[in-house]
């Protein structure tokens, strides 16, 4: 790889010959490793190093996009993108203005995983896998995966912006599958970090508990269906606000859909007055944070709900121009050959004034929904499954139940929140957000504990 100064010079020099209304070049290098065990066997081990990039040009509102593997022939790639843009452009180029940036942001790591020998990472996964399989006789299989990625993004635009940012990520995932006859149950956990290999290694201590939880779910009954009161733990509440509300805030869905624009119009009352939600790309040291998005817009903190009312949307430069708003730094791409689209960074429900204990004390009969297993959304309608749950009886957490699902209308549910605790947690998991075929994009999500009345639960 050539020097950083040389890469910058080649990218900025090529853009001087841009014939489009606007053009940008993003060039990335990516060093990654994977260690995976499935059951009692090592499943996959790999180390890779790749590089490449993308040129985007815009003329009369039409985009030309060319992916490339090498900085060689960069002038030719730019000309090709400009020609494609000129052929498809039929309108007016609309891109909101943002500050011109000149930023270099190296990674700030506590323990750099690149300095940890591969043998140590293999041993970590092997030990963890053995703990999962030995946790209970009912454990039939396991999946333990360690992954790391050190992504370096370089960006230059015809407006004169430049940034270089290192975006590391280490991930450790643990899953246990238990069987009793034809009944199977799975328990899982994961952790991600942008700064510290030790965050992954610390998850090893939970391996035995994850295996025991999978076995316990085999004996747990299903919950009764119908309207009920639930308390969501911070991860479940964070996933709920990300999936059910956060995606509705992404402006590329809004400006082309009149129904959604009305649904998400600014200052519309959609929840209780104590509800506040933000998307914060500046949160320190999170996997969802970044100095600039993949259009060169500095990251920001965007208030999405303030006192129960729609307060903002997430924008790229193009959606901001079309909706007469300011870019928010949410144009993100999952990798070197993808164009940026509007995506979340770290999406959180802000703290309330209740204590977690008070949320449970106010429930005579209900459920405590913990973590996240799966779900789906369709505009304002949602269905989510918790990874595991417990009964709440007379204000106390009781027996475990399995297969708890929660369904409803997003806006009715936001108005049914009647307790928000003061124990907000940002969760940096091992998965990622999926949208437009770009997955998994690193994001953070979180919340404090929240209580919701009269939500439809399913199970038995």
Image (cartoon, rainbow, N blue to C red):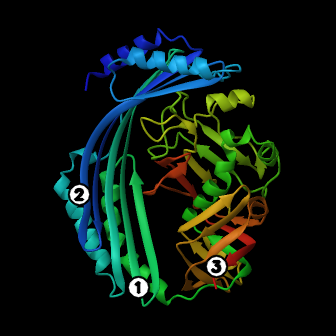
Image vertical order of residue 328 relative to residue 192, above or below: above
Question: Alpha-carbon distance for marks 1 and 2?
Answer: 29 Å
Q: Residue at x 79, y 63 (%)?
A: 412
Q: Classify residue 400 as left or right of residue 26.
A: right
Position in image of residue 274 (x %, y %): 74, 57
Question: Alpha-carbon distance for marks 2 and 3?
Answer: 38 Å
Image vertical order of residue 182 relative to residue 247, above or below: below
Position in image of residue 343 (x %, y %): 58, 43
Mark 1 vs 3, N-terminal side = 1
The answer to which image quadrant residue 261 occupies is top right
Question: Alpha-carbon distance for marks 1 and 3?
Answer: 25 Å
Disc 3: which residue: 367
Give the structural element (helix, strand or loop) at label 1: strand
Depth check, front residue: 380 or 366: 380
Q: Residue at x 27, y 21 (%)?
A: 3
Image vertical order of residue 105 relative to residue 359, above or below: above
Give the structural element (helix, strand or loop) at label 3: strand
Give the structural element (helix, strand or loop) at label 2: helix
Q: Residue at x 48, y 83 (%)?
A: 217
User: Would you say residue 28 is visible in this rendering?
Assistant: no
Give the number of the mark in front: 2 or 3. Answer: 2
**CB under 8 Å between discs 2 and 3:** no
Give the number of the mark in front: 1 or 3. Answer: 1
Q: Quadrant of the C terminus?
A: bottom right
**CB under 8 Å between discs 1 and 2:** no
Q: Residues within 10 Å of mark 3 (few under 14, many from 20)?
A: many
Q: Quadrant of the N terminus?
A: top left
Residue 179's tag is: 1
Position in image of residue 335 (x %, y %): 43, 39
Disc 2: which residue: 121
Position in image of residue 64 (x %, y %): 54, 24
């Amino acid at each position: 790889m050539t020097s950083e100064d040389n890469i910058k010079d080649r990218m900025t020099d090529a853009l001087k010959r841009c014939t489009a209304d606007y053009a940008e070049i993003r060039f990335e290098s990516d060093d990654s490793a994977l260690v995976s065990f499935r059951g009692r066997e090592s499943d996959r081990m790999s180390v890779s190093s790749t590089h490449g990039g993308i040129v985007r040009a815009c003329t009369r509102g039409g985009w030309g996009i060319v992916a490339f593997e090498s900085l060689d022939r960069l002038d030719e790639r730019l000309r090709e993108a400009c020609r494609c843009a000129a052929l498809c452009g039929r309108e007016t180029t609309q891109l909101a203005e943002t500050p011109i940036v000149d930023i270099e942001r190296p990674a700030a790591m506590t323990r750099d995983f690149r300095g940890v020998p591969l043998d140590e990472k293999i041993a970590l996964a092997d030990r963890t896998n053995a703990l999962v399989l030995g946790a209970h006789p009912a454990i039939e299989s396991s999946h333990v995966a360690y992954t790391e990625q050190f992504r370096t993004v370089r960006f230059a635009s015809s407006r004169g912006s430049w940034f270089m940012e290192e975006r590391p990520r280490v991930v450790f995932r643990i899953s246990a599958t238990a069987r009793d006859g034809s009944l199977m149950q799975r328990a899982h956990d994961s952790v991600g970090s942008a700064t510290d290999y030790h965050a992954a290694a610390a998850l090893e201590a939970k391996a035995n508990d994850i295996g025991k939880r999978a076995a316990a779910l085999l004996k747990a009954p299903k919950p009764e269906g119908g309207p009920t009161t639930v308390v969501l733990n911070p991860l479940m509440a964070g996933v709920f606000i990300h999936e059910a509300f956060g995606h509705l805030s992404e402006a590329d869905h809004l400006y082309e859909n009149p129904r959604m624009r009305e649904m998400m119009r600014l200052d519309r009352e959609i929840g209780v007055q104590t509800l506040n939600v933000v998307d914060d790309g500046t949160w320190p040291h999170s996997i969802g944070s970044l100095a600039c998005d993949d259009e060169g817009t500095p990251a920001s903190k965007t208030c999405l709900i303030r006192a129960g009312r729609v307060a903002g949307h997430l924008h790229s430069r193009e959606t901001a121009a079309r909706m007469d708003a300011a870019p928010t730094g949410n144009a993100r791409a999952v990798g070197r050959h993808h164009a940026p689209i509007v995506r979340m960074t770290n999406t959180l429900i802000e703290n309330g004034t209740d204590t977690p204990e008070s949320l449970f004390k106010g429930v005579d009969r209900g459920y405590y929904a913990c973590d996240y297993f799966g779900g789906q959304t369709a505009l304002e309608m949602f269905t989510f499954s918790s990874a595991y749950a417990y009964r709440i009886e007379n204000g106390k957490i009781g027996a475990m139940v399995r297969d708890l699902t929660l369904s409803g209308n997003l806006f009715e549910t936001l108005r049914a929140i009647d307790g928000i605790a003061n124990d907000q947690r940002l969760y940096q998991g091992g998965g990622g957000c999926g949208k437009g075929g770009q997955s998994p994009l690193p994001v953070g999500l979180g919340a404090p504990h929240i209580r919701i009345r009269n939500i439809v639960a399913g199970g038995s």
